[in-house]
Amino acid sequence: MFGFNKNLSLTAYSKFDNGQTSFFSYVGKYELQINPENIAISFGEPAATDEPNSAGGKSTTRKSPVYNQQTIKVNFTIDNSGAVPSAPDNLSFFNFNGDSIKDSIDQLLEVTVKPNNESHSPPFVVLQWGAFILVGKVFDLNIDYTYFNIQGDPVRAAISFSLIEEVDDVVISRAFRSPDITRIVTVKDGDSLIALSKSSYDDPMYYMQLASYNSLPSFRGLKIGSQIEIPPLEK
């Protein structure tokens, strides 16, 4: 469904169903001009829900902890001052160094937070960078304009946003399929969570679950000689 991306990309869709997006609900795409130096990932507890109690009122309970919903925070820069060889996404052929980055910012907003005509809500966003893929919704998007041209138009901006994973029953069931064997592997040169997920579960997409299970702060940069537990995923 997805190829590897050299630059981090954000692809927007109006619908998310059965654990995936559909080409027919495509909204648009934005590709970063400059990749972020790092991305921060956190794992949340299941959301609280209100359920009836014996007295007829409502009591707040938590769903069973069957899935640690992921949140990713990304920081990056858009720059059309001439300091970067490539131009920001969505600037026209006739745009020159020092021209406004407004059109690029508009496209970024279109694929992240602007409500679309079909669903009247912000789109579902597929964030992809190399083999890393996460589908969710963007929140807490901030734009800090840091450099302007002589006309007062912005030509550089620091951007940050968070994306919280979109989870449905298909996503949860997919995350908990597994072989029956628990094993521990010692990390060697060249190992990655993606490769371990592929070899253990015949699917590279469980690398985030491995990171969560082993309390790893990042899915990148495994320490050679450390041990990673490969658990069975509940069916």
Image: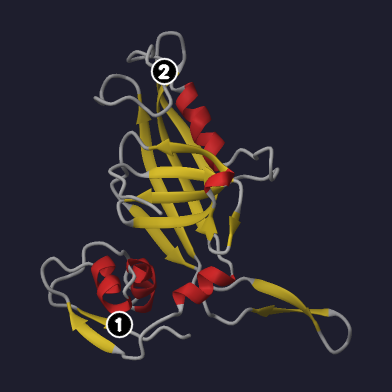
Q: Earlier in the sequence, mark 1 or mark 2?
A: 2
- Secondary structure found at label 1: strand
Residue lying at 39% horizontally and 56% vertically, measured from the top left: 133
- Secondary structure found at label 2: loop
Give left or right: position of 143 versus 185: right
Residue labelled with disc 2: 92
Amino acid type shown at disc 1: Ile
**Residue 127, percent across and down?**
43, 50
Return the residue found at the far left.
Answer: 189
**Residue 191, percent across and down?**
17, 69
Residue labelled with disc 1: 230
Q: In which quadrant is the N terminus drawn?
A: bottom left
Residue lying at 37% horizontally and 40% vertically, measured from the top left: 76
Cα distance in 3D space between marks 1 and 2: 48 Å
Give left or right: position of 225 versus 4: left
Residue closest to the eye, 190 or 202? 202
**Residue 40, percent across and down?**
38, 57
Give left or right: position of 44 versus 229: right
